[in-house]
Amino acid sequence: MGMSATLTLKDVDIIRGDRTLVSKLSLELLGPKLLWIEGGNGIGKTSLLRTCAGLSRPEAGQVSWSHDGSPLTAPQAISFLPSDGYAKPKLKASEDARFWGADLITVELIPHAATLTEKLSTGQAKRLSFSKMLATHKPIWILDEPLAGLDASGRDLVASHLQRHVQEGGLALVASHAPISVGKIPTQRLVLS
C-alpha cells in the first residue's frame, strides 16, 4: 500500500439532541497509527467515529482527510465498519462478498460461502462485513466495536489485519470495549468523558 494517511479535526463540536458530546476537539492524526477511542456507553464514541468518517456533520468545526499530502473526500479516504455490520439479505455469503469485490479467504469464511447472509451467526456476519472493508483498500479505517460477536480466532484475525494496515502506513480509528492485541504499532488513546 505504501501510504501516509492523515485525518484532521479542527474545533469540532458534536451535539446529539440537547447533549454536547464533543466540544472544540482539534486533532491531527498521521499514519502509521492506531487511535483507540475509549469511553463509557452513550458517551459519544460512535458519533465521533461517524463524524470522522464523514457520515455525520459536526455542529461546528471541520474534518478533513488526505493521503500523501493530497486532500481527499471521505468516500475516497475512509473505509467504515459499523458495530452492527451490513449484508444484503437473500444472498449467499459468497454472492454478497463478490458484489463488494471481497475475498472470504481473508476472513476465514469459506466454509460458510453458501450460507444465506441472514443465516450467518453474529461472528460470521462480522467477518463478512470485515472482508468488505478490506476490499476497499482505503488509507483510513474506522471501526466501531470490531470485536463484538467474534470468537478468539476472529479477534486475532481483526488484530492481524489492523496491525498490517498500520505497518503499511495506514491510519485506523477503533472504538472497542474489548482490548485488541496489535503488537508494537504506533498507538494513541483518546478518552471521551
Image (spheres, rainbow, N blue to C red):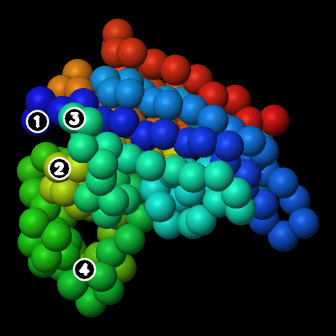
CA gap, disc 2 to disc 4? 26 Å
Please give the name of the residue rendered at 16% of the width and 56% of the height, measured from the top-left corner.
135
Query: Which of the two labelled residues, at mark 1 and mark 2, occupies the earlier sequence position?
Result: 1
Q: Is residue 26 left or right of residue 143?
A: right
- Residue 87: x and y, percent? 33, 75
Q: Which residue is mark 1?
A: 1
Q: Amino acid at mark 3?
A: Asp
Judge the density around disc 1: few (<14), some (14-19), many (≥20) Cα neighbours within 10 Å. Answer: few
- Label 4 or label 3, whichever lies nearer to me, is 3
Q: Secondary structure at mark 2?
A: loop
Q: Quadrant of residue 186?
A: top left
Please give the name of the residue rendered at 30% of the width and 48% of the height, measured from the top-left corner.
71
Numbered tag placed on residue 137 in the rendering: 2
- Residue 14: x and y, percent? 72, 56
Q: Is residue 81 left or right of residue 145?
A: left
Q: Which residue is mark 4?
A: 116
Q: Which residue is mark 3?
A: 68
- Label 1 or label 4, whichever lies nearer to me, is 1
Q: Amino acid at mark 1?
A: Met
Please give the name of the residue rendered at 47% of the width and 61% of the height, measured from the top-left corner.
54
Image position of 85 with respect to 99: above or below: above
Along the line of sight, the residue nearer the viewer: 129 or 25: 25
Q: Is residue 147 left or right of residue 70?
A: right
Query: Which of the two labelled residues, at mark 2 and mark 4, occupies the earlier sequence position?
Result: 4
Q: Amino acid at mark 2?
A: His
